[in-house]
Image (cartoon, rainbow, N blue to C red):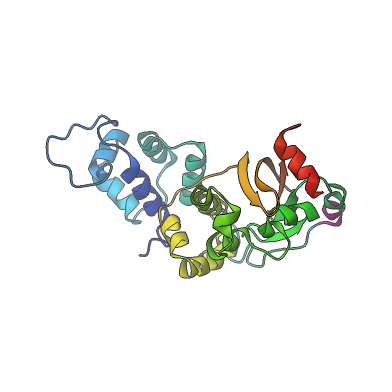
Amino acid sequence: MTREDNQLGSFLRTRREKIDAASAGVVDTTRRRVTGLRREELALLAGVSPSYYTRIEQGRDRHPSREILEAVARALRLDDTERAYLWSLATPALAPADAHAVPEHTVRPGMLRLLERWADLPAFVVAPNRDVLAGTALAARVNPAWSPGHNLIEFTFLDPRAPEVYPDWEDITRQAVAGLRTTAAARRAELDPFVAAMRERSETFRELWDSHDVYERVIGDKRLRVDGIGVLLLSFETFALAGPQGHVLYVYFPQPESKDDTALRSLV
């Protein structure tokens, strides 16, 4: 069984390896040769049988009870996003095998009209695989990846301009992969081929994907280097658009009356 076949076990293993044994209250007088917690130590902290926990992590029990997973989640100190991802792996949606197999890349006409009116903001719509489907002219001026026809993941990992555009490129790569993994848990038929292709095309992507981190960043700040302007600090908000397509609207904006506000206005 490959790691991709046993995503539940892989996720639990990577979380287990991130836990510091001493901080978890594990007393070990021997020279420790493992990273994080051993399986039997985690099982003890969770109050479950070591042999049963091993079956879960090895993929021999794909659907443990909610009570067991709650206990394991507490022992692993999972945050809300990680817990939600854990449930999605243990209880996959009962949908047809070909659900979401053909991504819908048509943006509603009303959304396109709104983007046309937001001339003073970088805003764009993305598909679950992070294809940019539509955006304002200012979005494309601020970041070449934010224009229709580009893919945010491909740009970040494969375009040589990315480290220049993103001063915090390493942080961006980690967040991008962790966010994509969160999305992929609910849309595997649609996203598995894209993930497989990216794993082949980028070693950095492959390493980050295999770390099994999950992340859902719906608001935040991002620094971008813009030609002729320098580095801009912009805040952003995200909005999930209604409908089965899984489209998300990103809107970036500066702090009022800041130097970033002045610089952005000069680009309009």
* Residue 25 x %, y %: 25, 29
* Residue 6 x %, y %: 40, 58
| Horizontal arrangement in the rendering, residue 238 relative to residue 41 (left or right) | right
Q: Residue at x 52, y 45 (%)?
A: 215
The secondary structure that most of the magenta stretch takes on is helix
Res 136 visible: no
Residue placed most toward the observer, 55 or 17: 17
* Residue 134 x %, y %: 76, 58
Q: Residue at x 82, y 45 (%)?
A: 120
Q: Quadrant of the N terminus?
A: bottom left
In reply to whether residue 127 is colored magenta, the answer given is no
Res 40 visible: yes
How many numbered marks have been drawn onto this rendered protein structure?
0
Identify whether 53 is placed above or below 207: above
Asked which quadrant contains residue 109, the reply is bottom right
Residue extending farthest left: 30
Residue extending farthest front: 228
Q: Residue at x 61, y 44 (%)?
A: 223
Residue placed most toward the observer, 263 or 187: 263
Residue placed most toward the observer, 39 or 112: 112
Asked which quadrant contains residue 59, the reply is bottom left
Asked which quadrant contains residue 184, the reply is bottom right
| Horizontal arrangement in the rendering, residue 195 relative to residue 233 (left or right) | left
| Horizontal arrangement in the rendering, residue 111 relative to residue 235 (left or right) | right
Q: What are the residue bounds of the magenta stretch?
A: 108-112
| Horizontal arrangement in the rendering, residue 172 relative to residue 22 (left or right) | right
* Residue 94 x %, y %: 57, 55
